[in-house]
Amino acid sequence: MTSLYDPTTALVVVDVQNDFADPRGGLYVAGGEEIVPLANEEIRAARRAGATVVYSQDWHPEHTPHFVTDGGTWPVHCVQGTWGAQLHPDLVVDGPVIRKGTGGEDGYSAFSARHPTSGEESATELDAVLREAGARSLVVVGLAGDVCVKETALDGRRHGYEVTLLADATRHVELEAGDADRALAEMADAGVTVHGWM
């Protein structure tokens, strides 16, 4: 889909990390490894067109209210400095990496972090990086579609970007049956262009 990219576009590659994209990972997303070559195709296409490529990376402390072991929702995953937190070894990394959840926050969107108990939100540097690059539209791929990819795409719309999601280049956690379709519908309703769905 090279036509998606030009110098005013940014490809945002969300959380393609071992804990999500490897069957041995702490929060493996079924089929997560399948999107790595698809993401790589998009990264190369974006670069050929002069687009910006940015990556997000969950980067949690060992203890955080985000984890079920500390009262949260999720299994322990993407702990700072561990194998699970590393970007997948087959992923082409050709751009800045935005780390999120670094202080124990819920780092769902690559644009922001939210304290899991107070709800207080703080911005990551993603929007500033995109503005400096002159990006006006975003293409989003990565993991997981019904969590961090969705929140990143929705935040992209809130920040005024045109956003396209490549549904083939994501996979979903589906804590509850139907979460994937609900997430895709929510994104579409918010004005995200969803390629490869329905």
Image: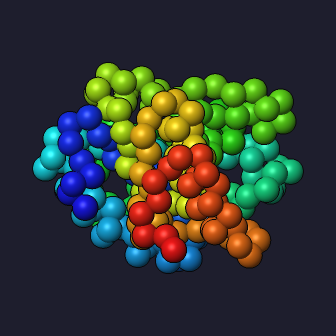
Residue 100 seen in this snapshot: no
Say above or below: 59 vs 146: above
Q: Nearer the viewer, residue 112 or 27?
A: 112
Say above or below: 13 vs 162: below
Say above or below: 168 vs 72: below
Task: Say which residue appears at 48% left-offset and 30% top-offset.
Answer: 160
Task: Say which residue appears at 46% left-offset and 54% top-offset.
Answer: 193
For residue 180, side relative to residue 166 (left or right)? right
Quarter placement of the N terminus: bottom left
Say above or below: 160 vs 106: above
Q: Position of residue 5 (x, y in %)?
A: 24, 48
Q: Position of residue 182 (x, y in %)?
A: 68, 64
Q: Nearer the viewer, residue 34 or 181?
A: 181
Task: Say which residue appears at 53% left-offset and 46% top-offset.
Answer: 191
* Label total for image: 0
For residue 177, side relative to residue 127 (left or right)? right
Q: Nearer the viewer, residue 101 or 119?
A: 119
Q: Nearer the viewer, residue 19 or 53?
A: 53
Q: Position of residue 198 (x, y in %)?
A: 51, 74
For residue 182, side relative to residue 4 (left or right)? right
Outermost residue toward the left in this view: 48
For residue 169, side relative to residue 158 (left or right)? left
Q: Position of residue 150 (x, y in %)?
A: 58, 52
Task: Say which residue appears at 36% left-offset and 39% top-offset.
Answer: 137
Residue 136 seen in this snapshot: yes
Q: Indicate how the structure is coloured in the image.
A: rainbow
